[in-house]
Amino acid sequence: MPHYGCISYSKRGATVCTKNHRVQVADLDEEIIHAITRKVLSPEAVDYVLKKALDIVTDKLRTTPNRRLKLEKQVANERKTLNQLLRLLPESEDDGFAELKQAINERRLQTQSIEQEISDLSVSLPSPLEEAMLGKINDMKRLLNSDIPLAQRALKELLYEPIVVTPQLKKGEERVELPWKKRKPEY
């Protein structure tokens, strides 16, 4: 059976490290996933994350109330300029108009960028945002409970440092202790 253990003890023996505790991979993976589910995906943790996310969105909308209107006007101006440039462009594929074609493409990209920003600002109703976030959280729960190797890869992407487990003796039984460090949120 595959297992986790101290690599130093495994390679060099007790003279280098006295930690000879080994845990089966399946057991530890299951314990970690259940611990994450209990701590990170608990109803209290989910409510906390949702509240913080909604506070951030609400604050952003409050500090930039006219941003959407300004962007919509900017899109209208960009479309007007694009139409003017398109009228100047002849039907032929003559290379003499390469600069004009480049200007049109730049305007299209700029317009798409502004439209995306407008779309991002459209998350003004907490309900759709909350539903989307709950959907992602439920996806994570399903992932953690269905496919261990995929869950391991996902956790490697999400965690800011490796999970280090420490063997502990509790009630006469060897167990592993999972450390939980609080991470300062980055907004």
Image: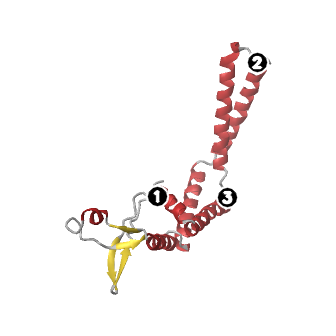
Q: Return the disc, 2 or 1, that comes first in the chain's sequence.
A: 2
Mark 3: which amino acid? Leu
Looking at the rendered structure, the kind of residue marked 2 is: Leu
Among numbered discs 2 and 3, the one appearing first in the sequence: 2
Residue that badge 3 annotates: 125
Q: Secondary structure at mark 2?
A: helix
Left or right, 95 with respect to 55, comes to right
Disc 1 marks which amino acid? Answer: Lys
Which percent across, then down, holds residue 68?
Answer: 66, 44
From the viewer's perspective, is the residue at label 2 or at label 3 nearer? 2
Give the x, y percent position of residue 22.
35, 72
Q: Is residue 68 above or below residue 126?
A: above
Question: Which residue corresponds to the image point at 66% horizontal and 44% vertical from the top-left?
Answer: 118
Query: If the image is split into quadrants, where does the N terminus sit?
Result: bottom left
Image quarter of residue 16: bottom left
Q: How many marks?
A: 3
Mark 2–mark 1 Cα distance, whole angstroms, equals 53 Å
Answer whether labels 2 and 1 touch (C-beta < 8 Å): no
> On the rendered structure, is 40 left or right of 131?
left
Q: Outermost residue toward the bottom? A: 171
Which of the 4 quarters of the picture holds residue 59? bottom right
For disc 2, the marked residue is 88
Which of 66 and 170 lies nearest the eye of the viewer?
170
Judging depth in this view, the residue of 48 and 162 nearest the camera is 162
